[in-house]
Amino acid sequence: MTYKTIMVHLDLEQYSEPALRVTCELADRFKSKVIGVTAGLPNVPIHADGMIASNVLEADYEQLNQAIGRCESHFRSALKDFNGALEWRSDAAYPVDFLVQEARAADLLVVGRAENYNLLGPNHLLEIGDAVMKAGRPVLVVPPRSTSLAFNRILIAWKDSAEARRALPAALPLLKRAKELIIVEITSDESERGAANERVADVAKWLQRHNVPASARVEPSAGAPGSQLEAIASEARADIIVAGAYGHTRLHEWIFGGVTRHLLQHGSTCALLVH
């Protein structure tokens, strides 16, 4: 398995340079086609009677089309030195709905976490958590201050769940190129340590059968699991964290598990998330 097609999302008016750099590096490594996508809706004022003036709506859509055009130009400029195939897709739509729809064309999605979400209107901002949970594809979340993506060390955040099991096959193209893999399970119950050791050992053996050697360890819980995992990744100098993404809906909003929420909102390491 490889990543034949990589899709990168750009927020309108706030392009993630780190996500574009990472996309270019990945595409060079895997000889991938790159599809750039963006979408948005105009922030249209609605009158008290619920009506929208047609001339206002037309002007706002014209502004939206201009913003989409600038976004495409930036995408092509950022990848001007890339020798592979490029494609651009855009629409007047909610960003997450459009990305999830177009994800069928890709093996891997790359999204950049905006540093200042409040600068973007709700119609222009990709809700990354929604994308991870709905896309049906692995999503590489790139923090706003990432400079590049190395493959030297990858940390696998293990939890004995369907999401974590799906994450490993989805990450295999990356795992096969890493110089060092570390499997970590965090347990809050000391009586579970023996079972946890067996679990991570099984994961290491599975990887070995795919010619991917890995070390495995179990860590006792020490505070918030997301922060602890990030600290372990920092200590190990991990370039990427691979994890299952956990969440459930309540009143039409996703409620995320602790590690997933941390990686989506505060993570300083690139994270490959799979739901």
Image (cartoon, grey):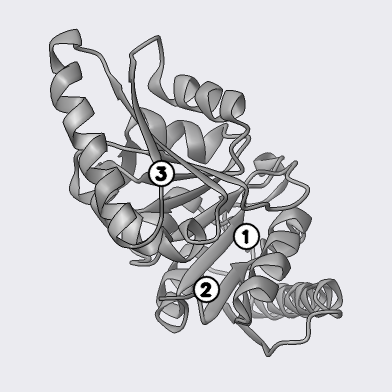
The answer to whether residue 140 of the structure is visible from this angle is: yes
Label placed on residue 124: 1
Q: Between disc 3 and disc 2, whose residue precedes?
A: 2
Specify few, some or many for label 3: CA neighbours under 10 Å numbering under 14, 14-19, or 20 or more: many
Residue located at (47% from left, 75% from top): 2
Q: Position of residue 116 (x, y in %)?
A: 71, 40
Specify few, some or many for label 1: CA neighbours under 10 Å numbering under 14, 14-19, or 20 or more: many
Q: Is residue 102 above or below residue 161?
A: below
Element assignment for label 1: loop
The answer to whether residue 40 of the structure is visible from this angle is: no
Q: CA distance from mark 2 to mark 1?
A: 9 Å
Residue located at (39% from left, 44% from top): 243
Residue tagged 2: 93
Task: Inspect the image, locate mark 1, and give the three-letter code of the amino acid beneath it.
Answer: His
Q: CA distance from mark 3 to mark 2?
A: 43 Å
Specify few, some or many for label 2: CA neighbours under 10 Å numbering under 14, 14-19, or 20 or more: some
Disc 1 versus disc 3: nearer the observer: 3
